[in-house]
Amino acid sequence: MPERIPREFFARPTLTVARELLGARLVHQEADGTRVAGIIVETEAYVGEEDQGCHARAGRTPRTEVMYGPPGHAYVYFTYGMHWLFNVVTEQEGFPAAVLVRALVPTEGLERMAARRGKQPRKTWTNGPAKLCQALGIDGRYHGADICAPQASLFLEFAHVFPAESVTTAPRVGLNTVPEPWKSIPWRFIADPRRLPQTNSR
DNA sequence: AGCACGATTAACT
DNA sequence: GTTAATCGTGCTC
């Protein structure tokens, strides 16, 4: 039985959580019991009101309220008129921060993913933050959900640990109009999926 | 009340 | 490399 990641894991510095979430398994247990899941291979950290790339730069608003709440909750928001993005709230309650999950390697519920991602090739099912939400069936219903609750249907499990040499960092994506140093600071974490144990992919 | 813009993607050229 | 699709949010008037 895989071990679910406890809340204390998320109640730490956001950069640490973002790095250590690489290799974790994101699981959506659907209403019929089907597990749709994948191993996280890319994340980004968004840290506090000072971070001009973080939504909380505007302060506490209805949209960002969840980021100010306790760690281990889902911050799910809608953008570009059609895409959902999934984040996990980090740090202590009262400090607004979160980790955006940007990419997964699919491992379970492949037929569900195929059904949701349509005719797209498998390689592109979960290689983007909005794509993985679509593939796993994550949308605004999960905004604010406690992913550490025992009965949670959306949660994280410890699965794999990537060695340091398989992890690289880079500036965060899509912050074109954000001022420096936030625009270039390397708070994006990328794991080499080739370092993952072989899956039954084809 | 109105508006510019975005933590994106897919389909173009 | 460029662009349309599409709408909630936060800011301005």
Image (tube, coloured by chain):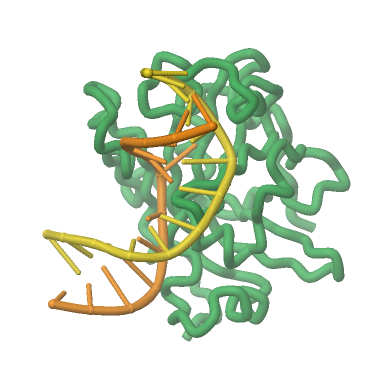
Chain colours: A green, B orange, C yellow
Q: Nearer the viewer, residue A16 or B13?
A: B13
Name the spot of residue A187 as percent of width and height, x first.
35, 33
Measured along the vertical axis of the image, is residue A192 above or below residue A164? below
Residue found 58% across the figure and 50% down from its top: A24
On the question of residue A156 being in view, the answer is yes
Residue found 55% across the figure and 68% down from its top: A106
A169 sits to left or right of A21:
left
Measured along the vertical axis of the image, is residue A198 above or below residue A169? below
Place residue A72 in its image quadrant. Answer: top right
Residue found 69% across the figure and 27% down from its top: A8
**Numbered marks: total:** 0
Name the spot of residue A53 as percent of width and height, x first.
37, 28
Name the spot of residue A124 as percent of width and height, x first.
43, 71
Q: Nearer the viewer, residue A37 or A24?
A: A37
A3 sits to left or right of A17:
right
Quadrant the N terminus of chain A occupies: bottom right
